[in-house]
Amino acid sequence: MNKQCVIVLGMADTLVQEADTDYIGADHGSLVLADAGIRMVCAIGDFDSVSEAEVQRIQSMADEFIRMNPVKNDSDSEAAVRYAIEKGYRNINVYGALGGRIDHEIVNLKLAEEFAGILTLVNEQNSITALNPGIYPVNDAHFKFFSIFALVPSVVTYEGFKYPLDHRTINPGDLYGVSNELLDHTGTLTVHSGKVLAIHSRD
């Protein structure tokens, strides 16, 4: 499915309703969407962070409502992401995934790694996605800095960057991929092999 899906996990400063986009609320993120007047294709979670009156508001704004047992092994964000994947979405932005509890943030980063090229974690300062082998355009329209970290041993090429790389092997322990910048406004990252975590960021 080419249609974009936005999953909201919590407060999202950058959230603006977009045309031709489906929305999924995860637990408290469902209330954020309901309060913003944004209808959801699904609200999912154990809803232990909202009142029953707020649950009713959420239900009135959701096409599907899935209430999970609070005694569970997966997080609300994982449940929402896997729901979206099962429904066929292949362009998923997740808001409210960064900051707050570190354990939840690590879960969300692991989900981005698992669903490379599909899932992007977004907040005011960062846009994070994992990339499999391929050629990827990079621009600085919203973010000044661009960093990559190898998730497995990888070979990459940077073109149009201040610090270019040419078929460089990077390993999960290497940290020199941080804080690169474009020479102009566009460049290219080629992942020849492996898998990398790509981070667009700004101060």
Image (cartoon, rainbow, N blue to C red):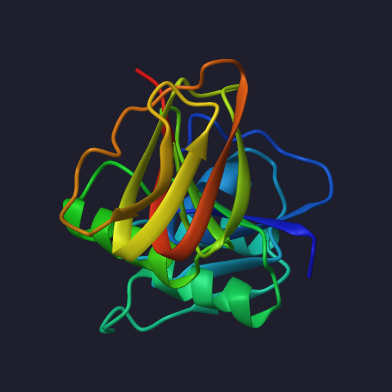
> Considering depth in this image, is 117 or 49 the residue closer to the camera?
117
Residue nearest the viewer, comparing 6 with 44: 6
Where residue 165 sits: x, y (%)? 40, 39
Q: Quadrant of residue 99?
A: top left
| Residue at image location 69% in from the left, 78% down from the top | 87
Name which quarter of the figure residue 162 lies in.
Answer: top left
Name of the residue lying farthest toward the right:
20
Residue found at x 45% / y 75%: 79
Residue furthest front as drawn:
166
**Residue extending furthest toward the left:** 173
Residue 77 appears left or right of 32: left
Q: Left or right of 63: which side holds 131? A: left
Q: Residue at x 22, y 59 (%)?
A: 172
- Whether residue 95 is visible to the viewer of this picture, yes or no, is no
Task: Estimate the x, y position of residue 101 in percent, counting from the top left.
Answer: 20, 50
Q: Please identify the quadrant where the N terminus is shown.
A: bottom right
Left or right of residue 98, residue 12 in this image? right
**In front here: 6 or 174?**
174
- Residue 68, picture quadrant: bottom left
Q: Please determine whether, in this image, residue 46 is positioned above or below residue 31.
A: below
